[in-house]
Amino acid sequence: MDRSGGLVQRRNVSSHNQTITNNDPEKDQVLPEEEDDHDSKETRLTLMEEVLLLGLKDREGYTSFWNDCISSGLRGCILIELAIRGRCELEKTGMRRRSLLSRKVICKSDSPTGDVLIDEALKHIKETDPPESVQGWIEYLSGETWNPLKLRYQLRNVRERLAKNLAEKGVCTTEKQNFLLFDMTTHPLTDSTIKQKLVKRVQDSVLSRWTNSAQRMDKRTLSLIYLAHASDVLENAFAPLSDDDYEVAMKRVRELLDLELDQEAMKDGANELMWAVIAAFIK
């Protein structure tokens, strides 16, 4: 996959979506621990819900018909949620270093997370022997495998289930739209504040809060940037920016895409499974 794919062409967005950003180079850099706890006093979204929310058209309530990347991207988000929540990890390497993508995913704890999709994936990983690699799990959870014995691992209706979660959290509503030959369930935005904060957090992470170090970035926000790019929805967060800020944001995203991921995974405090999932999409 071309690491910089989808980063060149800029799409126009109507002014009602525009958000305010600050790209003052003299502004003090803000470290991840100084950030708010992702609106901890308000609605908390999973990484999957955030990626889907970036992809949903505000008024129409559905993702682009041409987006064929978001399905596998959402499965990658589930694996990263398992990594960040301490439920899964990569197998140990022993004396010989091995690449992230050659190592298997191991269940570290099977305690429920409270999220049905995440717990469903965790159950599959726990019960699978021998264990599988990150790339294998993305294919299995997406149903993109030629092995009929692995089709039982497929997580079905993920987008619709996530959209239902967003509706239950008051972010979206559920409607039926008629498209000539068929009816389709859509989820128009009802609470623009939550999406605006999400978009601003993504923008600020590569502008006013840029740390020039992936290691110093908040893991969830860093994962969101990578997986939103892999799901072809990152452009939606950057399109409202001014031309200058847009160019800076794209440049810094390209810097993240060009990192040596195996080296990043070896740094202190790094989450190896998180980096392995990222590597599966930008290798």
Image (tube, helix red, strand yellow):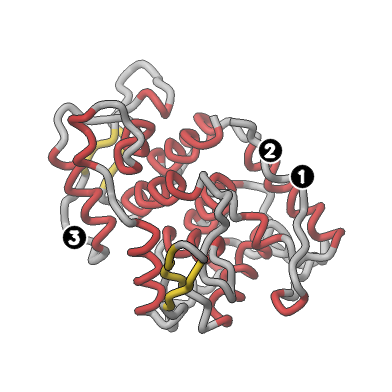
Q: Residue at x 67, y 39 (%)?
A: 5
For the residue pair 42 and 12, the one nearer the viewer reads as 12
Mark 1 or 3, nearer chain start: 1
The image position of residue 74, as x and y in percent, is 42, 51
Q: Residue at x 48, y 61 (%)?
A: 52
Name the residue that disc number 1 marks.
8
Is residue 77 shown to the viewer in this render? yes
Furthest residue in direction right, as rendered: 244
Mark 1 or 3: the one toward you: 1
- Looking at the image, residue 111 sits to the left or right of residue 48; the answer is left
Q: Which label sits on residue 112?
A: 3
Name the residue that disc number 2 marks.
4
Q: Which label sits on residue 21?
A: none
Q: Amino acid at mark 3?
A: Pro
For the residue pair 56 and 278, the one nearer the viewer reads as 56
Q: Amino acid at mark 2?
A: Ser
- Looking at the image, residue 89 sits to the left or right of residue 108; the answer is right
